[in-house]
Image: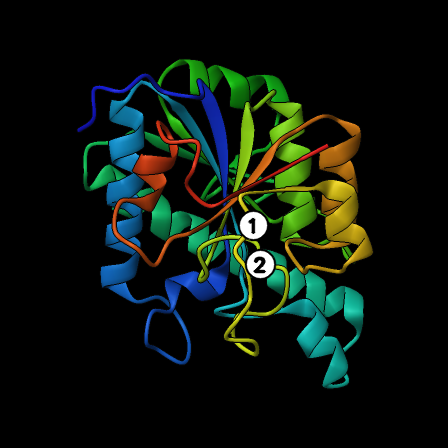
Amino acid sequence: MTDAPVLYQRVLLKLSGEALMGDLDYGIEPEVIQRTAGEVAAVRKLGIEVAIVIGGGNIFRGAGLARAGMDRVTGDYMGMLATVMNALAIQDALEALDVHARVMSAIQIHEVCEDYIRRRAVRHLEKDRVVIFAAGTGNPFFTTDSAASLRAIEINADVLLKATNVSGVYDSDPRENADALLLDTVSFDKVLVDKLNVMDATAIVMCRDNNLPLRVLSMTEQDTLVKAMTDSDVGTLVTA
């Protein structure tokens, strides 16, 4: 544990569903979700309030189902339910580490989680509970990236943390270009104009228009999330 001062008081972490698969082709890899929960628990020990938005791509992805011929709205609702499943898994992993967590869903599933109510979510955070936002925005055609931006703005998060499988934002795709340059900082407008694929355009515009900084970092490297709480050089900072 570091003695350096923390940079944030409240953060929102955006995790992709695919990040939970590990080496699997489908579903949740227990080792991955336990390691993720461990990092979130370490951040909480620094006194930082943590909220999480999780995708559902490891189970269902609405846009993909639509391309296969399913009605897009139906596919998106199936994707929302997948995010609830992932959120419950993260909640369970956190509680196994004695970290109090609450799942709040944008669609009503009273038997397994709470409805999303902004004031209640903020109160949970103030009581040192990790809040996991599920079911996206509750509306079809909106990604969990957009949901992450929206929830971060609503709870007045200091930063939106986008966890990926690369170290930050590059000037080109590092998987295709070995000479791709990792950027320390980049503007929202450049991300949009150059189509750097950080998050979808709606999410980027929401962050830009509401002055919400976005930090893109890798969750494949051990303790990256914890380091980002005290080290401003971790990943790439996207700002206005």
Give the left or right position of residue 1, taking residue 191 as reference: left
- What's the CA distance linking mark 1 and mark 2? 6 Å
Q: Which residue is mark 1?
A: 183
* Quadrant of the image containing the C terminus: top right
Q: Which residue is mark 2?
A: 170
Residue 156 x/y as whole percent:
61, 20
**Residue 62 against residue 35 in the figure, above or below:** below
Residue 57 x/y as whole percent:
54, 67
Residue at 45% x, 56% y: name it: 85
For the residues bearing labels 1 and 2, Cβ distance under 8 angstroms: yes
Q: Is residue 107 visible?
A: no
Residue reaching furthest to the front: 179
Residue 228 x/y as whole percent:
38, 36
Residue at 45% x, 44% y: name it: 112
Give the left or right position of residue 111, taking residue 145 as reference: left
Asked which quadrant contains residue 64, the reply is: bottom right
Amino acid type for the residue under numbered disc 2: Tyr
Q: Secondary structure at mark 2?
A: loop
